[in-house]
Image (cartoon, rainbow, N blue to C red):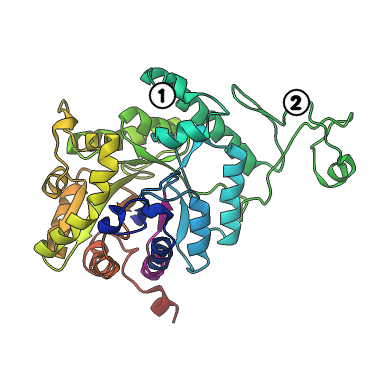
Amino acid sequence: MEVALFVPPTVGPAEELMKGLAGRRTDLYQVMLKNLVEIAQYIDEFGYYGIGFTEHHLSVEGMTLSNSPAMLGTYLGSRTKNLKFGAMGYVLPVADPLRVAVEVSMLDQMTQGRAFVGFARGIQTRWINTMAQHRYSLSDNITDPQRYDDDRRRLFYENLEIILKAWDNDTFSHKGEFWTIPAPRTDWPAQRMTREMGGRSLDAEGNLVEIGIAPAMYNRKRPPMFEPFSVSNRSIELAAANGLIPIGIMCDPGIVSEQVDAAQRGWEKAGVYTKRGEKLGFARYMIVGETDAEAREFAELAMFEWTYFFAQFGYNAVLAKPGEDWKSIPSTVEKFIERGILFCGSPDTVNRQLEAAFKFMPVEYLWLFTPNELLPQAKMMKHLDLLTHKVLPNFTDRIGHSRSKNAA
């Protein structure tokens, strides 16, 4: 099992966020970068898979402040040796697919093959409707939820198709519902350069017929591709059928078990035959202290993120049992532990929680929500040390061994 951190970057502790406009404060942002380096170098040393950052914009409040996951990945990649980095994920319905493709390939080149990528449909209307208004008007459809979802789904899959073409081919063309590539009747003055150095980009009459991105991926292969966070059985199955590793987030054991099966069906549709739980991930919070009481203290700080951000977007739905009204579920640490989105306690307690969970949730990838800055750095590093040496080695042989000592 691979273990990775999912970091929706927060720039400061709750008391600083509550002062207002924390996202615009240089002092907080610089401390956040320094602390992220410490976290990244620690988990790089002890065998973690990587760090995934959200793509969220306009976050003046200071939570989920990750305008460019690729830039954060490049920053940390230059300070680590093995860790992988990527977006979890790019919001494709509002993206320029060629820009996404080349950002990922640049990250992959700059880290020498350590990029992965996640693709999402997006839920944040503040920046989606603002930053995509020149392409299409999702805001016109916001009162019609079904049309809004359908538009995002169609845009998502056409943009994904273009990105894969860009990675798989030196040059290519595309004609779909939203994009024609290259743009028709493009006047291209540099014909001599392109004829002699640009592959099959021009026809005999000098018309531009194909384009390509540069640089290519480091090893000229697609990166590992994920789709966070899949909620329904249908979205899990569809992601796998399209070659994306689904990252589930639902908590009820019966629902989770169904989604493990849905992923397996999806991969079979893609012609890939998997073991149960293979090519599948789930996301959870995990907070470890020396005692249950200390872990609860840490969790009360860390789960500010869920209460003030994720719950506001309806994420308490992932805690619900079949037929239950998720709006009635309170956002408390006790409820988070009870429903299974949060593993919390001493190492012994968390080991028991994980052992019970993996009976119905076999996964190849475990993504851990990591509320940086909300948990003071000393407490964050203590939690990571306990997690790394007293919990995760009981479930995966990837974690806990010093890479430096092994190299020596």
Tell me the tag on residue 275.
none
Looking at the picture, how far across and down is residue 284, in whole percent? 26, 49
Task: Say which quarter of the image contains residue 97.
Answer: top right
Q: Which residue is mark 1?
A: 149
Give the vertical position of 226 relative to 232 (above or below).
Answer: below
Name which residue type carries label 1: Asp
Q: Residues within 10 Å of mark 1 (few under 14, many from 20)?
A: some
Name which residue type carries label 2: Pro
Q: Which residue is mark 2?
A: 184
Looking at the picture, how far across and down is residue 68, in whole percent? 50, 50
Residue 171 is left or right of residue 11, and the answer is right
Quadrant location of the C terminus in the rendered image: bottom left
Which portion, as a residue range, is magenta? 36-53
Say whether disc 1 or disc 2 marks the residue closer to the N-terminus: 1
Residue 335 is left or right of residue 26, and the answer is left
Looking at the picture, how far across and down is residue 180, in whole percent? 67, 26
